[in-house]
Image (cartoon, grey):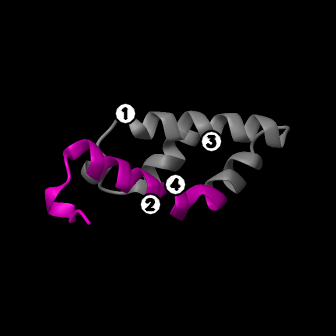
Amino acid sequence: MKTVMNLSMAQKNSISITETVKKYSKKLFGFIRGKVKSSEDAEDILQDIWYQLSNIDVDNLENVNAWLHRVAR
């Protein structure tokens, strides 16, 4: 089993993104759903947010929750 120290930066970022998605998905979906007409639109927006998150280094974000909500707005 690999330890976190032996993982590449891409692998570490993947773990961080996975943990972030698990932690914030429900709350963020509810936030978005309150602003759009349909659940399908909210799901599309949420997917776009996760894509944007995958293109940055999550560990460099000071406040992940604030960043997610700012992007969702």
> Mark 1 or mark 2, which has the lower sequence index?
2
Q: Compute the Cα span from label 1 to label 2.
A: 15 Å
Q: Which mark is residue 46?
A: 3
Instruction: Name the residue type under label 3.
Output: Leu
Q: Residue 71: x, y in percent? A: 51, 39
Q: Secondary structure at mark 2?
A: helix
> Mark 3 or mark 1, which has the lower sequence index?
3
Which residue is the extreme one toward the right? 37
Q: How many other residues sit within 10 Å of disc 2, few (<14), some (14-19) or many (≥20)?
A: few
Q: Which mark is residue 21?
A: 4
Q: Compute the Cα span from label 2 to label 3.
A: 15 Å
Q: Secondary structure at mark 3?
A: helix
> Mark 2 or mark 3, which has the lower sequence index?
2
Q: Compute the Cα span from label 4 to label 2.
A: 6 Å
Is residue 32 a member of the stretch shown in magenta? no
Q: Secondary structure at mark 4?
A: helix
Q: How many other residues sit within 10 Å of disc 3, few (<14), some (14-19) or many (≥20)?
A: many
Q: Compute the Cα span from label 4 to label 1.
A: 14 Å
Q: Main secondary structure of the magenta part?
A: helix
Q: Which mark is residue 55?
A: 1
Identify the magenta region.
Answer: 1-27
What residue appears at the point 31 percent right and 48 percent down from the top-left corner? 13
Quarter of the rendering containing residue 36: top right
Quarter placement of the N terminus: bottom left
Q: Secondary structure at mark 1?
A: loop
